[in-house]
Amino acid sequence: MASEGSGGLAQSAAVKLSEMGERTKQLGTAIQDPNRQRRIILVIVCVALLLDNMLYMVIVPIVPDYLARLEKESEKAQAEMHTNTSNSTLDQTQKDNLDVQIGVLFASKAILQLLVNPLTGTFIDRVGYDIPLLIGLSIMFLSTCMFAFAENYATLFVARSLQGLGSAFADTSGIAMIADKYTEEGERSRALGIALAFISFGSLVAPPFGGVLYEFAGKRVPFIVLACICFADGMLCLTVLKPFSSRTRENMPVGTPIYRLMIDPYIAVVAGALTTCNIPLAFLEPTIANWMEETMDASEWQIGLTWLPPFFPHILGVYVTVKLAAQYPHLQWFYGALGMVIIGASSCTVPACKNFGELIVPLCGICFGIALVDTALLPTLAFLVDVRHVSVYGSVYAIADISYCVAYALGPVVAGKIVHDLGFVQLNLGMGLANVLYAPALLLLRNVCLMKPSHSERNMLLEEGATGLYDTIKMEERQSKKKGYSSSAGNCVPVDENGTFGGNTRPYSEDETSEPEYI
């Protein structure tokens, strides 16, 4: 009887194992489906961008208070040795030193990211997108763990700088991977719009998330939660992308060097727009809290929720731009220019606000305008690489990341100095004027969608036939799609000799190639 019972259990276990094996095989087959794999990749990238921006902003309510506590503990014995007069002077000196430390700590991430982005962009172009993404997630995991257990300023500084290094890998490779996987211009705009929504959500939800957990659970808990999510995303990346077993990069075309992309006038105009439009947000984040306390006697909850309402106009801006780009792709430059004008006008009206309710309106305008600029111009960068260079996107999105980092590296360090020397009103008027004056420069992009694809190395490889696994995969992908060049060039309306839209609207085919057009 006992042997029969054990035999039945063994048979049942074997059946269950067989079912699990079959399900695993079905899951593996489903993951290999190109469309499903693209969605999974989009999820992995969006989670990585969400984590990076949450870690960027979660320290806002935590680190200043934590450093102040450390400062008080270390200076307590020293302060007791001074008189009341000298004690007041000491307190002011300590406050000034603490403000400088916090500003340097906040800026260190963007500064290091700015320095290493040219190297990471070239590295991504050489090895592909999957390994750099995994490297970035691993560094971000280490950085988050260091934040959780740091007990002094030096460790916090190292953790913040490491996050900048991880972001240089993860953000650039993630955005570049989206551009590479979504080759049709409408799908690319939607996918990049979703990624921008996750970036915005991470930046805006992180301060209340960190503040609440810090208040009720301590400093370590918010960072441990983010570290667990980062670890899960890294494991998903390792499982789905299989970066170390992929052989598709063996025959990858050689991307255009980053220095050549930087001197491309069209890419330079886009990069300048991305920097200029993000300056108001980067400069207001470290300065608006003190201004609200001084001018409108704002409460703590109002300061904490300052940037939460603008999240919804940002999402609206992404949605509107994606929809408009699908219908009128030749007006991408106009959406960006309009966004910069909205940012400029909104920035100029911030100092006129007298209460919290009034302040929300221009802040919503700034975030709505940033959404228009980012959503219109990020896909334009990929299209410019497609038609003027080689369709490898690591370096061009490293340039985009550099553009953001310039604004956010200057913000915590320069904004406070400008407010102190010139005033908050002058800061906002200057930022608004810069955006309005830069908007006409985007007119240079008005005929971008009329460019033909360049006779790039990738085109030549595919015209000559598949010579490796990478080419074979690309050939299969192209054959599975509709014939015709799958970018916005096929949707643009040509310009006739009078400068009006009309005439022959036949899309450019893959066989129609030309040398890159330069100004």
Image (cartoon, rainbow, N blue to C red):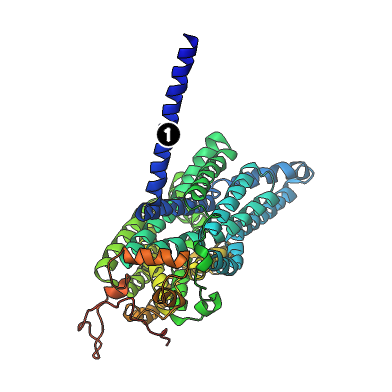
Query: Residue at point 40% right, 53% down?
Result: 37
Is 67 on the left-hand or right-hand side of 348?
Answer: right
Front residue of this view, candidates 429 and 354: 429
Is 185 on the left-hand or right-hand side of 142?
Answer: left
Q: Residues within 10 Å of mark 1 (few under 14, many from 20)?
A: few
Q: Position of residue 293 (x, y in %)?
A: 49, 52
- 36 w.r.t. 221: above or below: below
- 168 w.r.t. 149: above or below: below
**Farthest left residue?**
503
Q: Position of residue 338 (x, y in %)?
A: 33, 71
- 174 w.r.t. 299: above or below: below
Q: Secondary structure at mark 1?
A: helix
Q: Is residue 369 visible?
A: no
Image quadrant where one finds the C terminus: bottom left
Query: Residue at point 61% right, 66% down?
Result: 116
**Farthest top residue?**
1
Front residue of this view, candidates 451 and 391: 391
Q: Position of residue 194 (x, y in %)?
A: 37, 56
Is 64 on the left-hand or right-hand side of 373?
Answer: right
At label 1, the amino acid type is Met
**Farthest bottom residue?**
497
Residue on which the image places disc 1? 20
**Farthest right residue?**
81
Total numbered circles: 1
Is 68 on the left-hand or right-hand side of 239?
Answer: right
Q: Position of residue 133 (x, y in %)?
A: 53, 56
Q: Is residue 221 visible?
A: yes
Query: Residue at point 44% right, 55% down?
Result: 199
